Image (cartoon, rainbow, N blue to C red):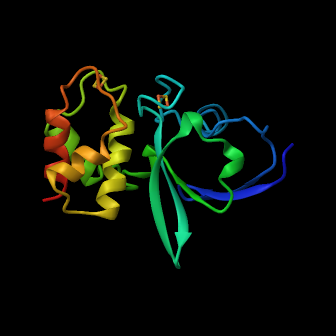
């Protein structure tokens, strides 16, 4: 027990003290909440497969940043909004424009890296719906893909911003 924290996970308010000081957000999402869309690749902050968004109130508005859930301790997330890939599709199953663009542009092959890329692109889309190619590349610099060669993913980012 390391004190109680409160946060919003996707659309659910959560209050918990049931975690240790080194419990990661990734383990919490996958093992405790069964939100397995967030993947574990390297488990040391290098590959971006575990990318989620964490929103904090800044000057009265929520500002989101992409974080590597594998190296973020759950206990550091009091008063945040945590957004995982499960949050993106609409209730009727319709894909978010970023997800649809990834499908349309063949931005996914084996798919292991895809949720992380989608979350980085979603974070960019929230902050800047019309990014330049340079801004897209910068937003994706923490995500690794062994299959696609990146061009299809960048194309998807451009399509999502149209
Ligand atoms: Fe690779 Fe988190 S699993 S950065
Ligand atoms: Fe296989 Fe990216 S699609 S690692």
**Residue nearer the viewer, 83 or 127:** 127
| Residue 13 appears in the figure | no
**Residue nearer the viewer, 158 or 46:** 46
The spot of residue 147 in percent (x, y) is: 24, 20
Where, quadrant-wise, is the C terminus in this rendering?
bottom left
| Residue 20 appears in the figure | yes
Q: Residue at x 79, y 37 (%)?
A: 20
Q: Hey, which quadrant is residue 141 in on the image?
A: top left
Horizontal relation, residue 80 to residue 156: left or right: right
The spot of residue 84 in percent (x, y) is: 48, 46
Question: Is 135 situated above or below 109?
Answer: below
Count of labels in the image: 0
Horizontal relation, residue 148 to residue 55: left or right: left
Question: Is 68 situated above or below 62?
Answer: above
Question: Is 143 situated above or below 85?
Answer: above
The quadrant of the rendered image in which ligand 2 is seen is top left
The spot of residue 145 in percent (x, y) is: 29, 26
In the displayed image of the protein, which residue is found farthest to the bottom?
60
Q: Hey, which quadrant is residue 123 in on the image?
A: bottom left
Horizontal relation, residue 113 to residue 84: left or right: left
Q: Residue at x 33, y 43 (%)?
A: 118
**Residue nearer the viewer, 8 or 141:** 141
Question: Is 32 situated above or below 109?
Answer: below
Where, quadrant-wise, is the N terminus in this rendering?
top right
Q: Residue at x 19, y 62 (%)?
A: 130
The spot of residue 5 in percent (x, y) is: 75, 56
């Amino acid at each position: 027990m390391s004190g109680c924290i409160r946060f919003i996970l996707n659309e659910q308010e959560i209050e918990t003290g049931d975690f240790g000081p080194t419990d990661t957000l990734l383990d919490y999402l996958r093992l405790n909440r069964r939100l397995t869309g967030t993947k574990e690749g390297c488990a040391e902050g290098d590959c971006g497969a575990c990318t989620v968004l964490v929103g904090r109130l800044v000057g009265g508005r929520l500002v989101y940043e992409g974080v590597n859930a594998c190296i973020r301790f759950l206990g550091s997330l009091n008063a945040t909004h945590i957004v995982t890939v499960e949050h993106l599709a609409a209730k009727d199953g319709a894909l978010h424009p970023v997800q649809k663009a990834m499908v349309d542009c063949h931005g996914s092959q084996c798919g292991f890296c895809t949720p992380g890329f989608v979350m980085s692109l979603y974070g960019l889309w929230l902050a800047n719906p019309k990014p330049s190619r340079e801004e897209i590349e910068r937003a994706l610099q923490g995500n690794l893909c062994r299959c696609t060669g990146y061009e299809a993913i960048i194309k998807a980012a451009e399509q999502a911003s149209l």
